[in-house]
Image: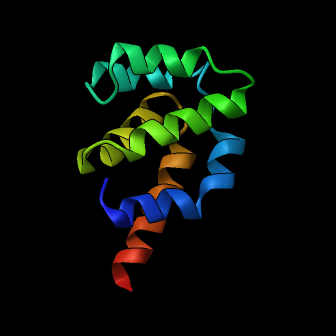
Amino acid sequence: MEPLQRKVLQQNWTFLIQNISTDESLLVDHLYEMNTVTINEMEVVRTQSPMRNKVVKLLEILQRKSPEAFHQFIEALERSNQSHIAHRLNESLEEELRR
């Protein structure tokens, strides 16, 4: 990810950890379908417990990915019925770009 994208994740870290659902929403499955994460990374996320650790691990993995991963993450959030989270990340990114 680009530094600005990582900054957006950092600024929303607590919100993301408290609000993202990795189990019921199949978020990680969508990321796998988009070739954003590997099957091994998907399994690493799934084996984490509790839910907070799953989200933290996923965010750590995504931060090491290409800039496209940020946009794929937002798309996966929308596909997994978490568009309110995608909206917040998009708003944060737009706000940072205006600075």
Q: Position of residue 69 (x, y in %)?
A: 31, 42
Say which residue appears at 25% left-offset and 45% top-offset: 66
Q: Could one spot residue 30 in this view of the protein?
A: yes
Residue drawn at (51%, 34%), measured in percent from left and top? 58
Q: As drawn, is 45 to the left or to the right of 20? A: left
Residue furthest bottom in the image: 99
Residue 48, above or below 85:
above
Q: Nearer the viewer, residue 22 or 2?
A: 2
Identify the image's colour scheme: rainbow, by chain, secondary structure or one colour: rainbow
Q: How many marks can you see?
A: 0
Could you tell me residue 14's position as x and y percent?
69, 53
Q: Quadrant of the C terminus?
A: bottom left
The answer to whether residue 61 is left or right of residue 37 is right
- Relative placement, left or right, of 78 versus 24 is left
Residue at image coords 36%, 13%: 39
Residue appearing at x 48%, y 67% in the figure: 92
Give the left or right position of residue 7, taking residue 67 as reference: right
Query: Residue 17, located in which quarter of the rendered image?
Result: top right
Along the viewing direction, whichever of 89 and 52 lies nearer the viewer: 52
In percent of width and height, residue 27 lies at 49, 26
Q: Quadrant of residue 41?
A: top left
Q: Quadrant of residue 64?
A: top left
Can you give x and y, in whole percent of width and height, for residue 98 in the image? 36, 83
* Residue 91 in sight here: no
